[in-house]
Image (cartoon, rainbow, N blue to C red):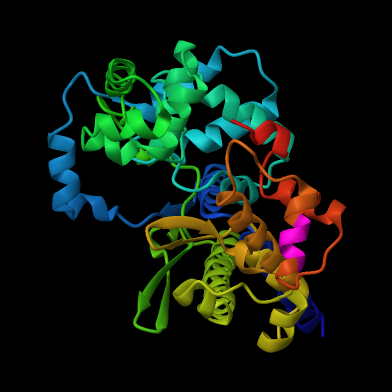
Amino acid sequence: MDFKLGLDQSLKLNLSLEMKISIEILKMSLKELKEYLEKESVKNSNIEIIFPKSNFSKNEDYENFIENIGEEDESLISYLEEQIIYLEIKREVRDILEYLINNLDERGYLISNLEELRKNGGFKLNIFKDAIKILHTLEPIGVGATNLIECLKIQLENKGILTDTLSNILDKNLEDIANADLKKISLERDIPLAKVKEYINTIKNLNPNPARGFYVNKKTDYIIPDLFVETNNEELIVNLNESGIPKIRLKNENKKDQILALALERGLIKRQETLLEVGRYVLNYQKEYILFDKNLKTLKVKDIAYSLNLHESTISRALKDKFIKINGKIESLKKYIVLDDKAELIKREILKIIESEDKNNPLSDEKILIKLMEKNLLVQRRTVGKYREELGILSSRKRKK
């Protein structure tokens, strides 16, 4: 009887520990998971965490890249991070700067649009804007742009020579600059040819690739994708990123450590199974958006839970801080969770309207509202302003060139 009671208590203890670890592991990002497991191995030296060897060791392109890095080349990320150490800024602004720096491509441009990056990071709009302004003052000037035109404007702004005329030439005549069609620019902008030559010389002295001379050290990336998504005709292929998932091994067998090691191992397996199941469901549900650029459809956590026969809290943990790599970009899996598809549709329309507006005479929220109503999209004016701000778009007064 005593033996049976002891066995029951042991099973309950094991189950409780396993459930607790499984819940914790599921809600972690891959970066957090790695840190958590490393701490566990430090706390318990009998548990060994064995991470898979990096695929880079067998990657010819990577080896060639390393060979081509000169001794004088420096990591762009390290160089930028060193600069922000000495800035007197709030911790939250510093965190955003570190996040942005680790989302630069090989040219020094941000890998995605600002609103997407802000949402993925879960940052407040006003603090995010402050961080962007600071990023644009760091050396090499021009890093943190989202495109070539913005990169050039950042450099002109820092030199104190960005005029309305130069801004318009960049916005409207970039192709003409590349083709050396100075007469066309002169006629369109109503500027003397000699002055056009001055402007073009100024622009040509700018650096379209601010990261040149550095290498972008991706070893310190803060965001690691949990899922890889490939498009094949009209199908999505979703696979797990197994490179961040280690094996758990005991150096010496003993019952206490065995219970913990088993709980960690099962927690990792459960995390991967749940993440793949949820990821495949979410991405296939929004397949038309991914493949055909249709609008995102309403998809709530409770809908996923019902369809997969899982608890809502499990779905929430599986979505928390999880990222996918798709079409060469890293995106938050939460991007595809949409509480109101009408709101998403209206936001997309607002973006289209603002992108096509006259930059010298930008549209007020009232005028955007009228254009939305012409498309049979009924919404209140204050909602237009709210959605515009959520998209990271300034007011018409501040957008005016």
Residue nearest the viewer, comparing 103 with 71: 103
> Residue 401's spot in the image, x, y percent?
59, 30
Q: Which residue is painted at 68% across and 25% down in the image? A: 91
Could you say where residue 138 lies in the image, as x and y percent from the top left? 47, 19
Q: Identify the residue at horizontal 26%, vertical 56% (top origin).
A: 55
Magenta region includes residue 130 = no
Placement of 209 over or under 159, stated as above or below? below
Q: Residue at x 15, y 44 (%)?
A: 63
**Which corner quadrant of the image does residue 210 belong to?**
top left
Magenta-span inclusion, residue 371: yes
Report whether residue 249 is seen: no
Question: Horizontally, is 47 left or right of 55 in the view?
Answer: right
Q: In the rendered view, would you say 235 is above or below 335? A: below
Quadrant holding the N terminus = bottom right
Q: Quadrant of residue 297?
A: bottom right
Please provide the residue range marked out in magenta.
Answer: 369-373
Occupied quadrant, residue 232 = bottom left
Q: Is residue 220 left or right of residue 23?
A: left
- Number of callouts in the render? 0
Q: Position of residue 332 (x, y in %)?
A: 57, 58
Is residue 50 shown above or below 373? above
Q: Position of residue 294 (x, y in %)?
A: 55, 75
Residue at screen point 51% across, 79% down: 287
